[in-house]
Image: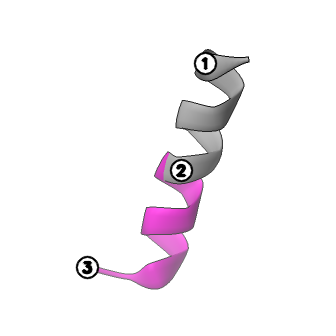
């Protein structure tokens, strides 16, 4: 898995969490 993809998913999760 690419770190970039992981960061993208994390950002998405953060946006959904907010």
| Left or right, residue 8 beside residue 18 | left
User: What SS does tag 2 mark?
Assistant: helix
Callout 1 touching callout 3 (CB < 8 Å): no
| Left or right, residue 16 beside residue 5 | right
Q: State the residue position of label 2.
A: 10
Q: Which residue is at the front of the view, 5 or 13?
A: 13
User: What SS does tag 1 mark?
Assistant: helix
Disc 3 packing (10 Å; few <14; some 14–19; many ≥20): few
Residue 15: x %, y % from top left: 70, 27
User: In the picture, which quadrant includes the N terminus?
Assistant: bottom left
User: In the picture, which quadrant includes the C terminus?
Assistant: top right
Q: Which residue is at the front of the view, 14 or 2?
A: 14
Residue 14: x %, y % from top left: 64, 35
How far apart are labels 1 and 3 at the CA level?
Answer: 22 Å
Callout 2 touching callout 3 (CB < 8 Å): no
| Left or right, residue 8 beside residue 9 | right
Q: State the residue position of label 3.
A: 1
Q: Which residues are magenta?
A: 1-9
Disc 2 packing (10 Å; few <14; some 14–19; many ≥20): few
How far apart are labels 2 and 3 at the CA level?
Answer: 13 Å
Is 4 contained in the magenta span?
A: yes
Callout 1 touching callout 2 (CB < 8 Å): no
Q: Residue at x 53, y 50 (%)?
A: 10
Ranked by sequence position, the earlier of labels 1 and 3 is 3
User: What SS does tag 3 mark?
Assistant: loop
The residue positioned farthest toward the left in the image shown: 1
Q: Which mark is residue 7?
A: none
Looking at the image, what colour scheme do you see?
one colour
Q: State the residue position of label 1.
A: 16
């Amino acid at each position: 898995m690419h770190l970039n993809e992981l960061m993208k998913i994390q950002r998405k999760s953060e946006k959904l969490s907010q």
